[in-house]
Amino acid sequence: MHNWVAIDIAKDELELNDDRRGWISRNESGAIKRLVAGFKKRSDIWVICEASGGYERQLVAALHAASIKVCVVSPNRVRAFARSEGVLAKTDKIDTAMMLKFAQSKNLRPTAPPSKQQVELAALMDRRTQLSDFLAQEKNRVQNSPSAIHSLIKKMIRTIEAQIKAVEKHIKAIVEATETMRERHKLFCSVSGIGEVTSWSLIAYLDELGKLKRSETVALVGLAPFNRDSGKKKGKRYIQGGRAKLRSSLYMAAKTAARHNPVIKPYVQRLLEKNKPYNCVMVAAMRKLIIHLHCLIKNNQLKLA
């Protein structure tokens, strides 16, 4: 049995629990370096932490560099486990205790370290999204602002557009220089409905594509339907969790595929004819696209399943 250490990660602090004691450390490079050095002196240390919107990246990178096994899990999985244990309260100490118990009771697989190119591509895609959101805000602002500042806002718009082009140039360079990324990009773009930006998002945020079971891949993206049934009542299915950054890009791809993809288009039409809600239909189309891409990579297929 592994010696687990559970770490609850916040912007500035790390709350740790190793089943013997709990303690707090800073979430900064020096403190993380000392933590990792201490872990290396102990035998068979495995670390469990939750995906925390990027606050976990520095710690996870340091653990990977030291060849220490780390499992990055969805917060929803740990919260569901806590509820199943009758624990409804939520504090940092409770979170680490539940994470520790969760790790000890499950057969978890360590999270594979991303390549340098993967890390850089994800960071660039994050930046592109930030700039695109900022650009949309400025374009909306110019419509509702006094004419006296129009020229200033338009100047800012040109600056943002130039930065987006610079970021995209870096993205293209990384994808083109990395054989696996280059091959995947070409493959993804061959699917009707998937454009350049969606392909970059898939490469940046879903490196596991083709490596897991298709049901696991669908759940990882957050497109697996959950039941809400009780007795004779059959509730509406819903989705939750997963990788929101990827879903937003996939949604646009699904809308395009619904108009042009020879398989997705009739599939969407059949669902709409059954009076399914539009957003539910789009989720189904996104799920079908992901399964297709999974099959393309895993089985080297060239047609939709």
Image (cartoon, grey):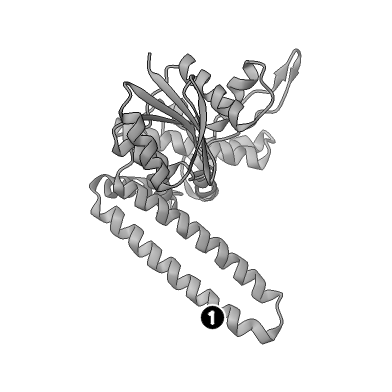
Q: Nearer the viewer, residue 119 or 300?
A: 119
Does residue 183 appear left or right of residue 111 in this picture?
left
- Kindly indicate the quadrant of the structure image that contains residue 275: top right
Residue at label 1?
155
Query: Mark 1 is on which residue type?
Result: Lys
Q: Residue at x 52, y 18 (%)?
A: 101
Q: Nearer the viewer, residue 149 or 103?
A: 103
Disc 1: CA contacts within 10 A as few (<14), some (14-19) or many (>=20): few
Looking at the image, the residue that sits furthest to the bottom is 148
- Kindly indicate the quadrant of the structure image that contains residue 96: top right
Q: Nearer the viewer, residue 283 or 132?
A: 132
Can residue 167 be seen in this snapshot?
yes
- Classify the position of the N terminus by image quarter: top left
- Classify the position of the C terminus by image quarter: top left
Question: Residue 197: horizontal and vertical position, in percent?
Answer: 43, 55
Question: Residue 42: horizontal and vertical position, in percent?
Answer: 33, 24
- Element under label 1? helix
